[in-house]
Image (spheres, rainbow, N blue to C red):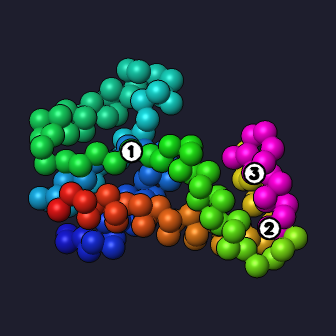
């Protein structure tokens, strides 16, 4: 199955959004997504589920580009950009206030979930992640 460049970018962006580390093989266009080990509670279960995959990546390290989930700073910037482009001034002010308070990620998520902008947020975040992935992949040609 031949994956288009846009499909690859989209898939990697979705995996990153889930908090996975991604490995992209430029030769085969294979994408390997692995959850963050530090978030896993059972080491044996993790090794059983991802041991072979990790071994494959290690054995062919030169063929894979590792793409890590965003740092919280970068995720926060995406939230700020989303808020900045909102045309609903009341909701924009609410979200600006949320970003200034404690626990901005949790509170932002709560506000978005309760709003009419939920899907707009998901679409915006996906596009921003795709831009980041496209940039990373273009640097490694």
Look at mark 2 in the image and give the residue it sits on: 92
Q: How many marks?
A: 3
Q: Secondary structure at mark 1?
A: loop
Look at mark 1 in the image and give the residue it sits on: 68
Q: Secondary structure at mark 3?
A: helix
- Is 72 above or below relative to 26? above
Residue 52 drawn at (x, y percent): 22, 34
- Tell me what residue is drawn at x 58 percent, y 71 percent: 123
| Label 2 vs 1, first from the N-terminus | 1
Q: Which quadrant would the N terminus be assigned to in this image?
A: bottom left
In this picture, residue 110 sits left or right of residue 139: right
CA gap between label 1 and label 3 equals 24 Å
Residue 61 drawn at (x, y percent): 15, 40
CA gap between label 3 and label 2 equals 11 Å
- Is 35 above or below relative to 44? below
- Decide: few, some or many residues near mark 1? Use Cα within 10 Å; few <14, some 14-19, many ≥20: some
Question: Which is in the foreground here, disc 2 or disc 1?
Answer: 2
- Is 37 above or below relative to 62? above
Numbered range of the magenta stretch? 91-105
Q: Does any portion of residue 20 appear in the rendered image? A: yes
| Label 3 vs 2, first from the N-terminus | 2
CA gap between label 2 and label 1 equals 30 Å
Q: Identify the disc placed on residue 81.
A: none
- Is 78 above or below relative to 45? below
| Label 1 vs 3, first from the N-terminus | 1
Q: Which quadrant would the C terminus be assigned to in this image?
A: bottom left
Look at mark 3 in the image and give the residue it sits on: 99
- Decide: few, some or many residues near mark 2? Use Cα within 10 Å; few <14, some 14-19, many ≥20: some
């Amino acid at each position: 199955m031949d994956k288009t460049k846009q499909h690859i970018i989209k898939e990697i962006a979705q995996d990153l959004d889930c908090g996975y580390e991604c490995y992209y093989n430029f030769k085969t266009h294979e994408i390997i997504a692995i959850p963050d080990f530090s978030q896993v509670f059972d080491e044996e279960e993790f090794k059983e589920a991802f041991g072979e995959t990790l071994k494959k990546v290690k054995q062919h390290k030169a063929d894979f580009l590792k793409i890590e989930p965003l740092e919280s700073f970068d995720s926060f910037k995406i939230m700020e950009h989303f808020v900045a482009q909102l045309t609903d001034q009341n909701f924009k002010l609410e979200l600006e206030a949320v970003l200034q308070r404690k626990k901005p990620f949790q509170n932002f998520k709560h506000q978005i979930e309760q709003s009419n902008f939920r899907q707009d947020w998901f679409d915006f975040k996906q596009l921003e992640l795709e831009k980041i992935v496209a940039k990373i992949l273009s640097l490694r040609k």
